[in-house]
Amino acid sequence: MSNYLDKSQEPLLDAAEGEIQAPEGGQWRTSLWKFILFSALGVALFIIPFEWDGKITILLGVLTDTLQAALGETVFFVSLAMVTVSFLGALAVKLLKPDLSARPGLKGMFDIEWPWLVIRFLGAVFIWMIYLQVGPEFIINRNTGGVIYQDLIPILIPLFFFAILTLPFLTDFGLMEYMGTLVRKVFVKLFKLPGRSAVDAMSSWFGAASIGLLVTMQQYDKSFYNLREASVIATTFSVTSIAFTYVVAKTIGVDNNFVPFYLTIALTGFVAAIIMPRIPPLSIKPETYHSGKSMLNERIPSEYSTHQWALNRAVTRAYSMPSLSKVFKNSFVNLFDIYFGLIPVVIAIGTIGLGLSEYTSVFNWLSAPLVPVLELLQIPEAAAAAPAMLMGFADMYLPALVGKGIESEMPRFIVGAASITQIVYMSEVGALLLKSNIKLNILELFIIFILRTLISLVIITSVAHLLY
């Protein structure tokens, strides 16, 4: 990923350090309205839930669905073009070595390391195989590459289009500073995190895991989070949306108990968020910053009340923002960086993960040690539930697809709830993290996944025994 920093946005960093004085007089009033209006737009887009077409969603979801419907089957050709250009462009830069120093946007998109070039190559090969239906069933089957190409990518392309272009309204016009100052003490004490991470949690909770993760990646790239904080937030607060939780509940056949199902997930996520930052590997991640120094200042001067300082920081941040044209220009660069960098990774890693689950016994072997744990927790059909749970590492939706075949409702309830609270799945969240500047490798992601699974199982199973 590019570091999301641009000369036009350097004043944002100064503002965060307190080097820009708060505006006064007319400039204060103008900046106050700038903070209120643009932040309200960000909240309306990313956070406020409402019912639309029979489902609970957010405005960003409506825009995404509308664009997805408008694109129709065109999205398949768009994704083909993206992945092909992504690989050929990176290959050309690697072989021809052009001087891109004057074009940092292009450099970020195509000047990549060899391992990422190999992944882009695999993504390009896989997507053409799937489109042409030529090649091994492991890749082109509807339940493997077909899920990624026909189900996931058509959602991600329009989602990222609106999410990346409008994300600054949520993050850059003062809302992060305002919320961060208000809830700082709570988040530091409970989660060992800065208060502004509350916005990440809300954008994930009401929007989508990828939205919250994009917020986290951006905040890390701008050095508002250190590596430990960004790692914790990305693997702890990137929960899936309420809407998708209902999809999982319906698929696995526990939607008749959706309220306790969702409350169980909320309780489990809260407990896991307290525990995970305090144990390895997250607790031992270094507290280093992407730019080398912190751009965050949440200390409250003695002469201000908490709310006064929250408003001061928010208005000052809004005052420091460049023009909207520059904001959108930077966002378009970031958008294509995401498209060219992430879509091939999702296709390559997602297809391999789903192929392993569909055509091999890898997940049965890996889940064997989990069976005695489930039996100890007195979970019926433990042998059938264990592989379904471990498949969540490949894709969040896989446990629901596999678990719906379990006869007893209690293990289905547990598998479905656990699939949501596991958070780390390679087809989307994992792929995003591996491609980001947040240095979490695949082994660390798997360890975090296992730890979250074990923590989740204890809580979810306890609730399930009360319900069933």
Image: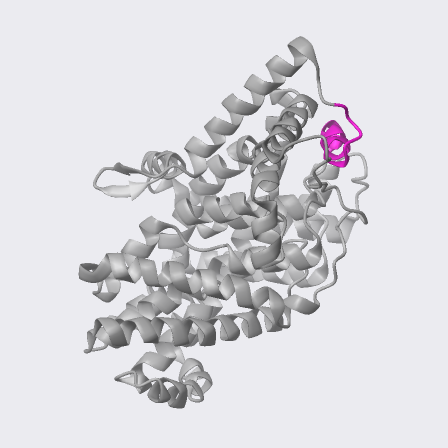
Q: Residue at x 54, y 50 (%)?
A: 213
Does residue 327 show up magenta in the picture? no
Colouring style: one colour
- Rendered location of residue 65, percent (x, y): 34, 39
Quadrant for the C terminus, please. bottom left
Asked which quadrant contains residue 149, the reply is bottom left
Tell which of 63 and 177 is nearer to you: 177
Does residue 19 show up magenta in the picture? yes
The residues colored magenta run: 6-21
Q: Residue at x 26, y 38 (%)?
A: 51
- Rendered location of residue 408, percent (x, y): 20, 78
Vertical arrangement, residue 57 with respect to residue 30, above or below? below
Q: Is residue 406 visible?
A: yes
- Rendered location of residue 347, percent (x, y): 49, 58
* 147 horizontally vs 291: left or right: left
Asked which quadrant contains residue 74, the reply is top left
